[in-house]
Image: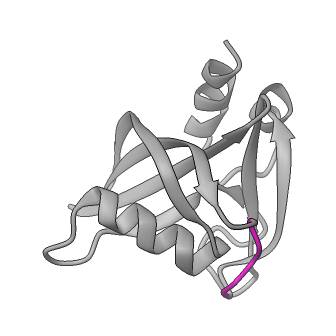
Amino acid sequence: MRLCVGALIVKQHCVLLGLRAAHKSFAGCWDIFGGSVECAESCGDALVRELREELCIVPEQWTFHSSHAHEDIELHLFRVEAWSGTPTISDTEHVEINWFPFHEAASLERLASMAYQEIFRALGN
């Protein structure tokens, strides 16, 4: 199993999602931010590194949300509500970022994982 982290970046009843680039897996789908945990790296360290690499932000406060297994991936999701910096695309993973109200995010047709629908709905409750 490949261990991965994902960030549910939340502000004012909205979640920040990125539109996956054409050359990446899940091309053209809206996705959360995150990636693989490297050897000898904690999930927290991976979360900080991934958000710095993908969005130029440094999370300052996060809480564990949930774990999900799919095929060969074990994904640990964290709710991030405080960070320094302004979210900006800083790599080639995504071509667009956007804040979505939870209910709107749950109803997007092109999500990288359909499991996100229930996760986004639960964030709104």
Q: Which quarter of the picture shows residue 71?
A: bottom left
* x, y percent for residue 77: 43, 44
The residue lying at 59 percent from left, 46 percent from top is: 82
Residue furthest to the left in view is 40
* x, y percent for residue 55: 66, 72
Q: Nearer the viewer, residue 109 or 40?
A: 40
For the image, the number of numbered tags is: 0
Q: Which quarter of the picture shows residue 20?
A: bottom right
Compared with 102, 10 (above or below) is: below
Compared with 81, 75 (above or below) is: below
Q: Magenta stretch: dominant SS?
A: loop
In this figure, which colouring scheme has been used for the structure? one colour
The residue lying at 60 percent from left, 55 percent from top is: 83
86 horizontally vs 125: left or right:
right
* x, y percent for residue 25: 59, 74
Q: Which quarter of the picture shows residue 24?
A: bottom right
37 horizontally vs 28: left or right:
left
Magenta segment boundaries in residue numbering: 87-91
Would you say residue 72 is visible in this rendering? no
Q: Quadrant of the C terminus?
A: top right
Would you say residue 40 is visible in this rendering? yes
Residue furthest to the top in view is 125
* x, y percent for residue 93: 65, 80
Asked if the stretch drawn in magenta spans residue 90, the answer is yes
Q: Quadrant of the N terminus?
A: bottom left
The residue lying at 84 percent from left, 48 percent from top is: 99
Q: Nearer the viewer, residue 100 or 68?
A: 100
Q: Nearer the viewer, residue 71 or 57?
A: 57
Asked if the stretch drawn in magenta spans residue 26, the answer is no
Compared with 60, 121 (above or below) is: above
Q: Nearer the viewer, residue 72 or 102?
A: 102
119 horizontally vs 107: left or right:
left
